[in-house]
Image (spheres, helix red, strand yellow):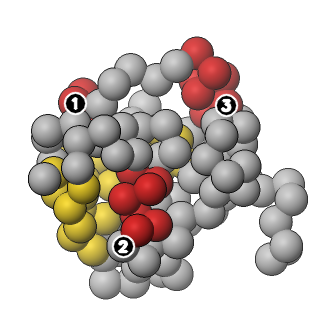
Amino acid sequence: MTKLIFLPHEELCPEGAVIEAEPGTTVCDAALANGIEIEHACEKSCACTTCHVYIREGYESLPEASEEEDDLLDKAWGLEPDSRLSCQAEVGETDLVIEIPKYTINMVSEHN
């Protein structure tokens, strides 16, 4: 099992979290299965940017982003070189340190 270390996020995991995931699981699915409610407005179909995360450590161990994911990431709030869509980033054998951005862009959010 691979460790996913989530840095503290004011709303989603104020204390941070360390969870385990099977290789091949997406970061989003692992987070959701462990009570970290990452927003995923498009139901994890790679059609929005609400599940955007920063992979602070272990980025190079992830499969390369698809062209579709790269195009969507260009629209994400706070894009950085280690940004990924958590619904597309599949966990490998290397532990990851993940930061959830403070803000997300969701044009269809019911919480606005």
Splitting the image into 4 quarters, where does residue 94 fall? top left
Is residue 107 visible in the rendered image? The answer is yes
Q: Position of residue 65 (x, y in %)?
A: 46, 23
Indicate the amino acid at tag 1: Ser
Q: Amino acid at mark 2?
A: Asn
Query: Label 3 sits on what residue type?
Result: Leu
Q: From mark 1 to mark 2, how far is it between C-alphas?
A: 22 Å
Where residue 55 appears, as percent x and y from the top left, is: 34, 45
Quarter location, residue 33: bottom left
Between label 2 and label 3, give the one nearer the viewer.
2
Compute the Cα span from label 2 to label 3. 26 Å
SS at mark 3 in the image: helix
Residue drawn at x 49%, y 37% is 88
Q: Residue at x 72, y 56 (%)?
A: 41
3D distance between C-alphas at marks 3 and 1: 21 Å
Provide the secondary structure element on which disc 2 rests: loop
**Between disc 3 and disc 1, whose residue precedes?**
1
Residue drawn at x 58%, y 15% as measured from the top left: 67
Q: Which residue corresponds to mark 2?
A: 34
Q: Which residue is mark 3?
A: 72
Q: Which residue is mark 1?
A: 61
- Residue 46, given in percent of the width and then of the height, sits at 64, 36
What element does badge 1 sit on? helix
